[in-house]
Amino acid sequence: VEILTWPLVQGFFFFFFFFFIYLQLIGSGSAAQVVTSEGTHGSYLTIQLGSALGAMFGIFAARGVSGAHLNIVWSMGLCILGRHPWEKLPLYALSHILGAFLGAATVYLQYYDAIQVFSGGELLVAGPSATAEIFCSYPADHLSFWGGLVDQVVATAVLLIGCLALEDRRQGPLPDGLTPVLMGALVLTIELSMGSNCGCPLNPARDLGPRLFTFIAGWGEEVFKAGGDWWWIPTVAPFVGALIGTVIYELLIEAHHRNTPQEEQSPGQELETADKEEVVVDSRNNR
């Protein structure tokens, strides 16, 4: 099987561009505006709104080409269900990480002056003038290791269950164009109800790519040491949550559909059709 086909390379750059623009640039930009203005130009709510709306418009922009996979754990869920080829997953993940890295770099350049003034020229991970949180997640002071792990597993499981339900035509057809809006609403709902522990990262690439950027841009190795080596939880736990959410939906919902017309497609099958047309992508979520 030839993996590095031209359509797959196109898919790589497609993922890269839309992850860069809609998830990282808008999501981190919302956070940068709030942090550097010390809350005078936004709040926790506007950060979450920016993240959710970025996801929604990313799905709107990409869905016509491929179904808009903007979260690698969503694509993994489809692979588990046999609706997406496993061999394409690593390249998609790489495109997400690179897109998130470049998005973080762009936000840093855009808000460079504000970050320097707010931080006093010292790039810190913790403390009242910390700015690393603009780009990736860190645990709240009260959050334990196991609490953070459970937080991310549960939040990502809820994300996958919701996304699978929205893509499941046997739940009833949705008006054209409504699915991206509801997916954005799903992301916002999760962030507003599960965000106080660690900011609700939900997306491994969305956290790892910017963390790598901050590591080389001046924040240093503390971005990996902070929170008791917190970094690997938002990188690994979402995959566990995605697996659990996918299995729950498969066993408790999809397995009980009856008398489904042959032409109605279950979650991800429309995306698989787009893949067979060889214009590939990887959908989100949500974060």
Image: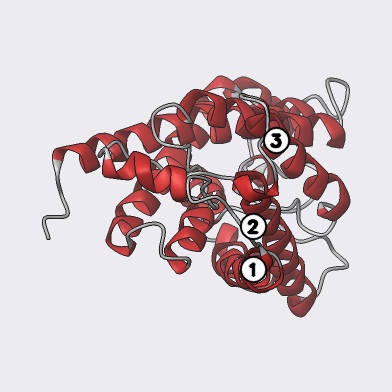
Mark 2 vs mark 1, foreground winner is: 2
Can residue 115 be seen here?
no
Which x, y percent locates residue 43? Answer: 87, 31
What residue appears at the point 44 percent right and 26 percent down from the top-left corner? 64
The N terminus, quarter of image = bottom left
Label 2 residue SS? helix
Mark 3 or mark 2, earlier in chain: 2
Residue at figure coordinates x 56%, y 20% from the top left: 110
* Left or right: where 2 falls relative to 111: left
Q: Is residue 286 left or right of residue 215?
A: right
92 to 100, vertically: above or below = below
Tell me the number on the disc at residue 184: 3
The residue furthest bottom is 146
Instruction: For the residues labelled 3 and 2, say whether their Cβ atoms are less than 8 Å apart.
Output: no
- SS class of the residue under badge 1? helix
Q: Earlier in the sequence, mark 2 or mark 1?
A: 2
* Dot 1 and dot 3 residues touching (CB under 8 Å): no
Q: Amino acid at mark 1?
A: Gly
Q: Whole-Å distance between the Cαs marked 3 and 2? A: 13 Å
Q: Is 247 or 206 nearer to us in this picture?
A: 247
Q: Position of residue 11 (x, y in %)?
A: 30, 38
Residue underneath mark 2: 160
- The three-letter amino acid code for the residue at tag 2 is Leu
Q: State the separation of the CA atoms marked 2 and 1.
A: 8 Å
Q: Is residue 90 visible?
A: yes
Q: Residue furthest left?
A: 2
Residue at image mark 1:
241
